[in-house]
Image: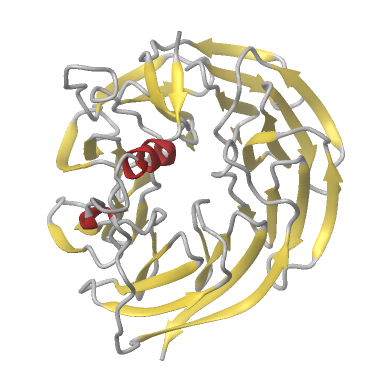
């Protein structure tokens, strides 16, 4: 039987095993330090999108397309917002628990429920075009392109559905480890290829038209004497940028892959389930301990790293022209200078934890906390 565990529960269990008198201080969240601001950050708008997230849907993320934001809460409320001011354009209640969302493409919005139902809604008004029952829970937002909807389910199956009616066009099965971190990587569609991050520590490139495997690259090798030690899940969405494919694994590392051959061009050890941030020639990641690292995206050369936010439950980064942004468990968004890694600014958008991936927008980012508050921030020069 395949088991998915929440990484936060594992870490919480480790902390709970310590008595009040023998707590390992190295596991405590780092205290916030003072700094001289060198980058400006300001709130543009903030709105409630519904009931937020629960423990099974904490990675529900907004999706941005053109001038609209599409977002869902765990209770099934799907909304479209004006990206300029957060004003609601439409909202529908699917009356079901949502675990996979939100994906956009081909004029539709996609979300998936805890019992494996994929919904396709019209971007114009939120009306349901079709819904399809799959055999497993869906934890990653479906993605669409060239008439095909790609869904990666919890059981490891990749399903390609017809964007018009939801009928299955093809399916790829993969071997699942016995124990995995709860979560799945969002599929990435690049032209006529779909990139899939598997819980086995591999990234596969498949032809969008028929699912034929073009290459399979191993990012991490399972090692250890038990299933917990051997978990090498890829929960970060594969990223195509700078002519390379980037993959990041738990208990493995970050790898740059030649998209023509599937062979790695550089590799750096790390352990993460967070999203990858890339902008221009800079790639940034955060590991499970909260260390933030920045690399030359082409060569893999380390540019800087910071443990300023160790054990603060930081999200994956967004790389901006001026700064690298991450968020933490106390509702803070932190900025680090992109070129040096120096702490540049911080803002608290609320008092609730931020676990959902940050979403880059023009001149800033979107932040969704666990209470369901969505905030738009602008980043600029002081």
Q: Residue at x 41, y 91 (%)?
A: 382
Report the front residue among 282 and 9.
9
Asked whether residue 165 is in view, the answer is: no
User: Residue 102 at what x, y percent from top left?
Assistant: 64, 43
Q: Tell me which colouring the rendered structure shows.
A: secondary structure
Q: Residue drawn at (33%, 61%), measured in percent from left and top?
A: 29
Which residue reaches farthest front? 21
Depth check: give the residue in front, 254 or 331. Answer: 331
The reply to whether residue 338 is in sight is yes
Residue 215 image-quadrant placement: top left
Quadrant housing residue 262? top left
Q: Position of residue 124 (x, y in %)?
A: 83, 49
Figure check: 116 above or below 367: above
Residue 276 percent coordinates (x, y): 36, 49
Name the one closer to the observer, 213 or 371.
371
Whether residue 311 sits left or right of residue 267 in the image: it is right
């Amino acid at each position: 039987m395949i088991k998915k565990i929440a990484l936060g529960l594992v870490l919480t269990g480790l902390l709970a095993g310590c008595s009040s008198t023998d707590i390992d201080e190295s596991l405590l969240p780092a205290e916030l330090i003072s700094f001289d601001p060198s980058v400006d950050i300001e709130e543009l708008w903030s709105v409630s999108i519904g009931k937020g997230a629960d423990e099974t849907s904490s990675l529900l993320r907004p999706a941005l397309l053109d001038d609209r934001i599409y977002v869902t809460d765990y209770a099934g409320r799907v909304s479209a917002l004006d990206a300029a001011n957060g004003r609601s354009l439409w909202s529908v209640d699917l009356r079901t628990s949502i675990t996979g969302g939100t994906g956009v493409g081909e004029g539709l919005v996609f979300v998936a429920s805890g019992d494996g139902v994929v919904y396709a809604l019209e971007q114009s008004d939120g009306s349901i075009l079709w819904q399809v029952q799959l055999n497993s829970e869906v934890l990653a937002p479906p993605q669409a392109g060239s008439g095909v909807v790609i869904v990666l389910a919890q059981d490891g199956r990749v399903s390609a559905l017809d964007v018009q009616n939801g009928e299955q066009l093809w399916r790829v099965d993969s071997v699942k480890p016995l124990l995995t971190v709860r979560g799945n990587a969002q599929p990435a569609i690049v032209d006529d290829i779909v990139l899939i991050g598997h819980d086995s520590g591999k990234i596969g490139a498949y032809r969008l038209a028929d699912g034929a495997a073009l290459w399979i690259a191993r990012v991490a090798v399972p090692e250890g004497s038990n299933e917990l030690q051997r978990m090498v899940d890829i929960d970060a969405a594969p990223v195509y940028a700078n002519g390379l494919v980037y993959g990041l694994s738990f208990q493995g590392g970050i790898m740059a892959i030649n998209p023509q051959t599937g062979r790695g061009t550089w590799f750096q050890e790390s352990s993460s389930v967070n999203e990858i941030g890339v902008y221009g020639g800079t790639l940034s990641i955060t590991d499970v301990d909260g260390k933030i690292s920045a690399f030359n995206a082409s060569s893999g050369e380390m540019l800087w790293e910071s443990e300023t936010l160790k054990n603060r439950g930081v999200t994956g980064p967004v790389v901006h022209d001026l700064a690298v942004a991450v968020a933490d468990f106390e509702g803070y968004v932190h900025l680090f200078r992109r070129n040096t890694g120096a702490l540049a600014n911080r803002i608290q958008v609320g008092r609730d934890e931020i676990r959902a991936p940050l979403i880059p927008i023009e001149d800033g980012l979107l932040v969704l906390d666990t209470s369901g508050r969505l905030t738009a921030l602008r980043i600029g020069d002081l």
